[in-house]
Image (spheres, rainbow, N blue to C red):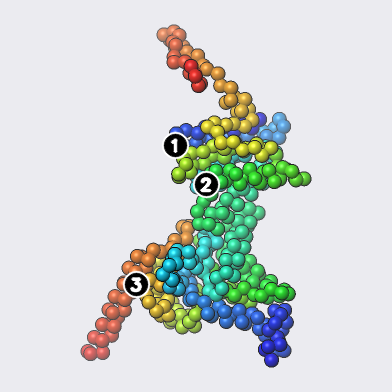
Amino acid sequence: MAARYDRAITVFSPDGHLFQVEYAQEAVKKGSTAVGIRGKDIVVLGVEKKSVAKLQEERTVRKICALDEHVCMAFAGLTADARIVINRARVECQSHRLTVEDPVTVEYITRYIATLKQRYTQSNGRRPFGISALIVGFDYDGTPRLYQTDPSGTYHAWKANAIGRSAKTVREFLEKNYTEEAIAGDNEAIKLAIKALLEVVQSGGKNIELAVIRRNQPLKILESKEIETLVTEIEKEKEEEAEKKKQKKST
Amino acid sequence: MEYLIGIQGQDFVLVAADNVAASSIIQMKHDYDKMFKLSEKILLLCVGEAGDTVQFAEYIQKNVQLYKMRNGYELSPAAAANFTRKNLADYLRSRTPYHVNLLLAGYDDTDGPGLYYMDHLSSLAKAPFAAHGYGKRFILNLPSFTVRLIDKEGIHDLEKLTLGAK
C-alpha cells in the first residue's frame, strides 16, 4: 500500500499519511543525538560527536551553529540539508535586523525555519529536509527559549528535549531528572546536558560537543578539557551517590 | 554641507564627521551620527543623498554581519571596502544608483590600520588621509602655517607648521 503513496510528496495516502515526511523523520532518527536544555540564565546544547577518521580534521565537523549572536541551533539528520536551512536562517536573521532594526526572537526564527520546512512538504518535485533542529537562545527581554522543529514543519517550545538516535532514552532521562534544582545554576544545567548525553554516548567525554549561551553573551563552545573536567565531576558525584546508597542499605 | 575626514596614523585611524542633517537651509538635526559600525574594527562613514545613505550603509552593515555568522570570523577592512565598492558599482549602472560618498576606516590584525576613500562613482582608493565635502577642499591643499602667539608680553613666534617637504 505504502509503495504507491510515497513517490511524490504532495500525495496523501488513503489513511492520511504523508509518507515522505515520515521517511524523513526516520532519517532524523539515524542521525547522532543532540540534546537541548533551557536553564534560568543559560541555554545548553549538546551533541554526540561521531568519531572522525584518522586522517580527518576534527574541527570541520560542526553540528552546533550560531544563527545570530543570541541564537544558535543543533540538528540531527542529514548534514547537507542542515547546511541549507542554517544558511537561510542566517540570512533571515540579518534581513530581520535590517528591516525591523531588532534582533529576531527565538520563536520568530524557529517559525521561519518551520515554515521553510513545511513548504518543502507541499511542493512538487522536492523532498522534505531530513533534519530536526533544536533552536536555543535569549529573546531581547532576557527570556531563555528552546524550540524543536521536525521535517513536517511543526515546532514546539520545550524545557528540555533530545533528537536523533536514542532520543527517546535521553528524553525519558530528562523527564526524570529535569527539576528546579537540576537547573538551578549554569553549571548544573551544563552537567545535566552531559549526563543526558552520557546515557547514550559510548566513549564518554571526548565524543561530546557542548555549547552554551548565557544571557547577553555570545555563543560559547566548550573546549574538550572543560568537558572532561565536568565528566570527571559527574562520575565522582555518581560514585558518592552509590556509596551513600550502599551505606543506607547496610544500616 | 556635509563633512567627512579621515587620517591614518601609525597604528590607528582617526575619523570625524559633522553632526548636521540639513534640508537646504534648515538644520533638521544637530546630533545626527553618520558613522556605521560594520564590525568590531571597521567603521563606515556615509554622506550624500538623504535616504540613500542609511539604506546603503545599513545594507552593507548587515551583509558584513552575515559574513561573520556564516564563516565564524569577520571580513577584513580591505575585503569590506571592496565588497562595498562592488555593490556601489553594480547599482551605478542600474535604474536606481546610490548617490553616496563614503570613507571606510578599519584595523586589520595583520596589516594594521587602513583608510579607504569611495565616492558615488564607485571609485576606491586606499589613502593615508581622505575627506568628503567641504573637508576635501580643506585637507587636500593644506598650506604651511606661520604661527604666532599674542599675550600681555607681546607677540611671540611659535614653530612654523609645514606639510610635507620644507
Residue highlighted by disc 3: A231
Residue highlighted by disc 1: B11
C-alpha span from label 2 to label 1? 16 Å
- Residue B144 in the image: x percent, y percent? 52, 17
Amino acid residing under circle 1? Asp
A104 or A64: nearer the eye? A64
Q: Residue furthest bottom?
A: A1
Tell me the element at label 1.
loop
Q: Chain of mark 2?
A: B
- Residue A153 in the image: x percent, y percent? 63, 74
- Residue A188 in the image: x percent, y percent? 38, 70
Q: Is residue B8 left or right of residue B153?
A: right
Amino acid residing under circle 3? Val
Q: Please report the residue visible at 64 percent of the width from the left and 49 percent of the height from the top.
A: B59
C-alpha span from label 2 to label 3? 39 Å
Foreground disc of the pair 2, 3: 2
